Image: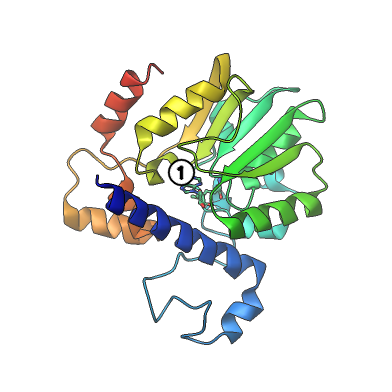
Amino acid sequence: MSERTSADLREEVRSRYAEAARAVLQPQADSSAGCCGPAAASCCGPEPIEVDPAGNFGSHLYGEEETDGLPEEALLASLGCGNPLAVADLREGERVLDLGSGGGIDVLLSARRVGPSGFAYGVDMTDDMLALARANATKAGAGNVEFLKGEIESLPLPEASVDVVISNCVINLSTDKPAVLAEMFRVLVPGGRVGSSYEAAADNLTSGVGASVARAVGITATLRTSALRCEVRRMTVQSGV
Ligand SMILES: C[S@@+](CC[C@H](N)C(=O)[O-])C[C@H]1O[C@@H](n2cnc3c(N)ncnc32)[C@H](O)[C@@H]1O
């Protein structure tokens, strides 16, 4: 993938998630901005990510008792495709890193699991998502979390600084997946663990099917940045996972 294309795709991903964050942060402002106002991409530009006011994009992937007490905005902004905590098996006192933390739902849930002696970091490249996540952490009264600005291909954390890396449908958005895998293993302690939900294209995906999958998940960049399942397997093996 050329430098230009890769940068363009990243900007497309960033601007769509910024739009989704703003829809949760300032719903009134967005609707009063009008069809072609500054906050409305829906009828003037590419189709926006659907943020369902009923919180049904990603929040239904969690148990009700699991999300009990979380700020509504964290649930509304839940845009993952799975529940990485279901496989991460977090323990008291562990340090967790969420790649592409969005509105913060997975960081806040991790923080609860690891307790006050543990810590949960979120890394995200989108300023509006970081603002939403930080506001959600304040509302949730979570003292053991930090949201850092950065790209998952170049993580703003020192080596061997976390016990577990989680990710909810974000690695598939990267245009440089081998770099993400290498960074994951740089920041993990030896013997650290990974819990990730990942959206990989079927190996026999046709462009027509791919386009409808992309519409269903609400972001065309997902299709353009997704790797085929066989490629994911190859990258994982090459990275030494
Ligand atoms: C699918 S959402 C997941 C958010 C959250 N974990 C959840 O379940 O709701 C993707 C998030 O990853 C961020 N993101 C996408 N690509 C990224 C990259 N290369 N580096 C850092 N953040 C990225 C986006 O800004 C967005 O907030």
Q: Looking at the image, can residue 63 be seen? A: no
Q: Looking at the image, can residue 192 be seen? A: yes
What amino acid is labelled 1 in the image? Answer: Val
Looking at the picture, tell me which residue is in the foreground, 102 or 131.
131
| Quadrant position of residue 175 | top left
Label 1 Cα neighbours within 10 Å, binned few <14 / some 14-19 / many ≥20: many
- Identify the residue under disc 1: 170
- Quarter occupied by the N terminus: top left
The CB of the residue at mark 1 lies under 8 Å from ligand 1:
yes
Q: How is the image coloured?
A: rainbow
Q: Is residue 93 left or right of residue 175?
A: right
- Above or below for 87 versus 100: above
Residue drawn at the location 57% of the way across and 85% of the way down: 33
- Above or below for 206 versus 192: below
Residue drawn at the location 33% of the way across and 61% of the way down: 215
Residue furthest front in the image: 3
Looking at the picture, tell me which residue is in the foreground, 63 or 184.
184
Residue furthest top in the image: 190
Q: Is residue 52 left or right of residue 74?
A: left
| Quadrant position of residue 127 | bottom right
Residue 65: give x, y in percent of width and height: 71, 44
Residue drawn at the location 82% of the way across and 40% of the way down: 143
| Quadrant position of residue 56 | bottom right
- Above or below for 149 versus 182: below
Residue 155: give x, y in percent of width and height: 54, 35
- Quarter occupied by the C terminus: top left
Residue 53: give x, y in percent of width and height: 59, 68
